[in-house]
Structures are given as structure tokens and as C-alpha cells.
Image (tube, rainbow, N blue to C red):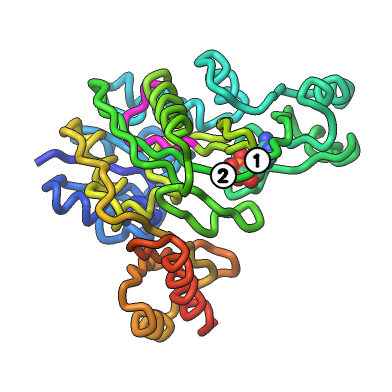
Amino acid sequence: MKRIGVIGGGQLARMMIPAAINLAIELRVFAEQQDAPASLAVTAVGDFRDVRQVADFAADLDALTFDHEHVPAEVLRALEDSGVVVAPSSQALALTHNKVVMRQRLSELGVAQPRWCEVSEASELESAVESVGGYPCIAKKPTGGYDGKGVRVVHSASDLEDWLSQGSLLLEEKVPFVRELALLSARRRGGEWKPWAPVETRQKNGVCSEVIAPAQSLSETQLGVAEELARTIAEGVGTVGVLAVEVFELADGSLSVNELAMRPHNSGHVFTELSTTSQFEQHLRAVADLPLGSAALVAPGGVMVNLFGGVDADAKNDAWERVPEAKIHDYGKGAREGRKVGHVVVTGDDVKSLLDKAELARSALHAAR
Ligand code: ADP
């Protein structure tokens, strides 16, 4: 039996559990607390920043992977130096640790992306803004951002005074996108690579609210460009496991890369019901160096909606009664305003009616609160 370790006990580790069972993989989760969403598979509780604790956990694993991107680079490198198979590698993960490093690497790979530059001094700001196309532009903290935190629209220099005093920033052209897409794929160490169909992601307040799969009305040319882009990044970065590439679609149909994640991603949850192989199964196959599964869709379409705040048992029963085809995924997290606590997937023929059904289930789930 292959033994795979996961650092982090959140919902992504939780959703790897059923996939691991079916693959006969022994999954061991290193969490910050026993009472984590992935508690069923937690075998160690500790601090992922402490190289000794992580090394002890990783000692007899076939490979180590992640539920989040916060493990420090020096911890990852120490593990690799001692012979642990880290997937994705510290080198690949460096891109997700720092958005400036990511932009640099994507430039080297020749991938289409927004105009960007790094600013470290207030005195450089005006020329930097000009180089990305003027105001309004987008500023991002290079490290530590998620769900839109650490991203700001900038209209004048005064919008950045506080942030610039804290350290350097990534400045980007504000892309006039018509739609946001995510390109999910998985890569195995030897190079085997399989993409899923592109999906559309819809955000509210900087957080993904709905996903529509496959993204509707993409032309053959766009599908080709999307696939080439995801493959170039997966191979160029040499990642192992699931890669999510968040992209902007522009009015002329061109695609521009926003962000990368090298792990299962919120935008790929729809594939648990919509694809022959879920992103969690594919991630584990890739990390365990097993042949990848088919990423073909098993229905014409699917919709995923995120649940925020809390999932209450009565509300869940109500939602199941109203929308029996809704697959409700409850992460087992405590309720907190705005917290992502679960998601709903509905699959079928017509995306418009799937959106209505998923929204009906979501409103029943949110109503009780
Ligand atoms: P996070 O890491 O917090 O998810 P992102 O870089 O994905 O941050 O940005 C969050 C959202 O902000 C994106 O989904 C998009 O809607 C918007 N955004 C980010 N970068 C740009 C940009 N260059 N132009 C226009 N909108 C952007």
C-alpha cells in the first residue's frame, strides 16, 4: 500500500480521504489540530513550520503533498535534502509562495499575462503605474494573499501609502476581462499530463461563488490555447499533482493568466461529480506516481456553488428534500461569517437550469441562518 502524507487538515485533505480509500492509498494527514476538517485521517498534530516535526511525520511516506501552500521553502528543501519525495517540489511551490516570482517565471515561459512590475519605493510608483498602463491598476501583496485579501484596485498613489510602507508590491495592469476561467489539469512525475475541460469561475467580493463546467461557448481555438497554456505551465514548472491556472478571458477571446495553485482547487470541486476522475483522486494518483485516470466528463454540464457561514443539519435536510439531485459537501467546519464551509454540485444537461437548482439548494442551506 502506498503511503501518502498531506500537510494541512483542511477541506482539501478531507476530500482526498474517499479517493485514497478507493485507490487503496494509506493517507496520513499532519494537521494543526486534531479537530480539523480532515480529522478522520489525522495522524499527527503539530506546526508545519517546524522542520523536525514535519520530518518525523514524513519519515516513512512514499510521498508528501499539501492541502495548502504555507509550508516554508526552507522546510520543503530540508525534507527534499533528506530524501523525502515532496510533490509538488519546493522549486515548483516557490511560485505559489510569491506572486512576483510567479510573474517572473511565467514571463520566462512566454505565457500571456497582465503587464506587471515590482515596486518597492513610493518614488518608483508613478513610472511603475505608467509601465502597466496607468490608473486604475491592481496592486497585490506578493505573499500571504488569498480570496482577494491582499489585492487592491489603485486609483492614485495615496491608495498605496500604507502597503508600500510594509514592503514591495506587485503592480499589474487592470485587465478588462469579460469572464474568469480556471484550467485544471494534473501531471505525474514522469510527465504524463491530463487536463479537464476549462470551467468558468464567478467571484463575489473577490471570493469564488459559482463555477460553471464546462465554460460555455469557448471556441475550438480558445480551447486549444487554453490547453497549450496549461500544458506549458505544468511542464515548465515541473509540477506534480493538480495544477489550477486561473485565467482572464478578454473581449477579443484571448486568455491571460492571473494565478496558479499547485493542489486541488475550489474551481475543480465540480469534477467530483462531473468527471470520471475527481481532482482529489487525480492528485493522489499523480503524487503516488500511479497512472492518471480519465478526465472525461460524465454529463454535459455541472454547476458548483460555494456555501458560506455555516451548514446547519436541519437546513441540509431541507435542501436535500427540495433538490434531491444536489450533492452537498459539508466540510465539517464551525460556523463563522463569510467562512467557506461547503459546496453544492448539480450535474445534468442544461447549465442554466443547473444554476437555478444549485442556487435553490444554496438558498435553503443559507436560509436557516
Ligand atoms: P487571491 O490570491 O486573493 O485569490 P487574485 O490574484 O486571484 O487574488 O485576485 C483576486 C481577484 O481580483 C481575481 O479573481 C480578479 O477578479 C481580480 N483581479 C486580480 N488581478 C487582476 C488584474 N490584473 N486585473 C483585473 N482584475 C484582477
Give the magenta range. Answer: 237-245
At a point 65% along the width and 40% down the height, the residue shown is 177
| Crowd class of label 2 (few under 14; some 14 to 19; many from 20; radius 10 Å) | many
User: Is there CB contact under 8 Å for labels 1 and 2?
Assistant: yes
Residue 233, which numbered label?
none
The crowd level at tag 1 (other Cα within 10 Å; few <14, some 14-19, many 20+) is: some
The quadrant the C terminus occupies is bottom right
Q: Nearer the viewer, residue 19 or 296?
A: 296
The residue lying furthest to the top in this view is 108
Residue type indicated by callout 1: Phe
Along the line of sight, which residue is nearer the eye, 163 or 267? 267
Q: Position of residue 53 (x, y in %)?
A: 35, 39
Residue 25: image quadrant is: top left
Position of the N terminus by quadrant: top left
What amino acid is found at the position of numbered circle 2 in the picture?
Glu
Mark 1 lies on a secondary structure that is: loop
Left or right position of 90 against 288 = right
Left or right of 173, for residue 76: left
In terms of image quarters, where does ligand 1 lie? top right
Name the residue at 47% across, 64% down.
352
Ligand 1 near label 1 (Cβ, under 8 Å)?
A: yes
Q: Which mark is residue 180?
A: 2
